[in-house]
Image: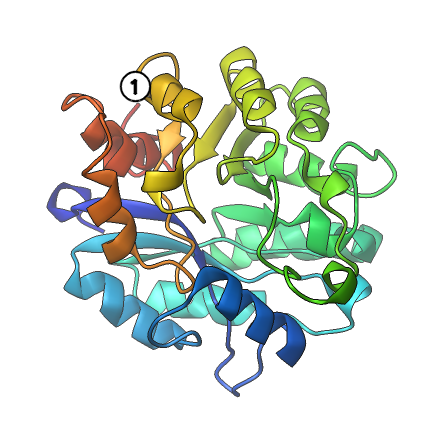
Amino acid sequence: MDVRDLVAIDVHTHAEVSAKGHSSLDDDLHTASSAYFKVEGNRKPTLQQMAAYYRERRMAAVVFTVDAESATGTEPVPNEEVAEAAAANADVLIPFASIDPFRGKAGVKRARRLVEEYGVKGFKFHPGVQGFFPNDRSVAYGLYEVIEETGTIALFHTGQTGIGAGVPGGGGIRLKYSNPLHVDDVAADFPQLRIILAHPSFPWQDEALAVATHKPGVHIDLSGWSPKYFPPQLVQYANTLLKDKVLFGSDFPVLTPDRWLADFEQLPIKDAVKPKILKENAARLLGLTQP
């Protein structure tokens, strides 16, 4: 990967379909989330199509599945498939994995293997969909130990989710799990763990900003929302106290980087800060450049 030639690094994209056509969401959740995000174009690009999409735009993308099989009964897109596609398209794709935290010791063993044998750079957690509190020591702490030890990254969905929105009962997804203050405990218990709080964390935006300013290893990605809807305090902190810890993310394919970047240009972000958010902060965090 030639970081110098990249326009941006998108730290938040989803592999939503496997090579066999298997989706990681059931039909009801998939249809409802497409309506929620007003998705235009191909909602289920293959990994090869994603690579071509980002290559055309001279961008790199962190890509992952979400393993919530215990809660949903649906198998995820295989982590190994994501990692192999990233290896075959290493100029543009960066592999993260996802392990259902209820897989216990087997999940911990799998996480280590994905790092050591497949070159995975981080792990995605979606507490609402997976149905766990991030600070529950009996559930995911074994995974955090491996992630911290291997120097990889833990990325947590925070705030409201479009998954389940509009479905009766929210599809059984409970928003309480995604308060970023639960991740504050994780950051305190694993001081060397590098963490990304994904999305503007509505309705807990101030909590996310507090955690990111207080804990050195905690970053915020800006995915899942058009920038024109960002809370004012998020823009203020991105311009100042968190200018080195805020990251461009789109949530592709539900939100395209084209739309996100067009709206981002309308924000009052300082010229000196824009390249940090779009590329430099992610390149440093991912180890693509020297600190």
- At label 1, which amino acid type do we have? Asn
Residue at screen point 20% across, 37% down:
266
The location of residue 246, given as percent across then percent down, is 38, 29
Crowd class of label 1 (few under 14; some 14 to 19; many from 20; radius 10 Å): many
Q: Is residue 50 above or below residue 137?
A: below
The location of residue 171, given as percent across then percent down, is 74, 64
Residue at screen point 70% across, 46% down:
127
The location of residue 236, given as percent across then percent down, is 35, 18
Give whichever of 35, 173 is nearer the camera: 35
Q: Is 147 situated left or right of 272 in this image?
A: right
Residue at screen point 40% across, 77% down:
46
Q: On the image, numbered disc 1 is attached to which residue?
A: 239
Farthest residue toward the right? 138
Regarding residue 200, the answer to whether it shows in the image is yes
Regarding residue 109, the answer to whether it shows in the image is no
Q: Is 114 situated left or right of 243 in this image?
A: right
Q: Exactly how many numbered labels are in the figure?
A: 1
Q: Is 289 situated left or right of 32 in this image?
A: left
Q: Is residue 197 above or below residue 48?
A: above
The quadrant holding residue 234 is top left
Quarter holding the C terminus?
Answer: top left
Residue at screen point 70% across, 27% down:
186
Q: Secondary structure at mark 1?
A: helix
The location of residue 232, given as percent across then percent down, is 39, 24
Q: How is the image coloured?
A: rainbow
The quadrant holding residue 244 is top left
Farthest residue toward the bottom? 20
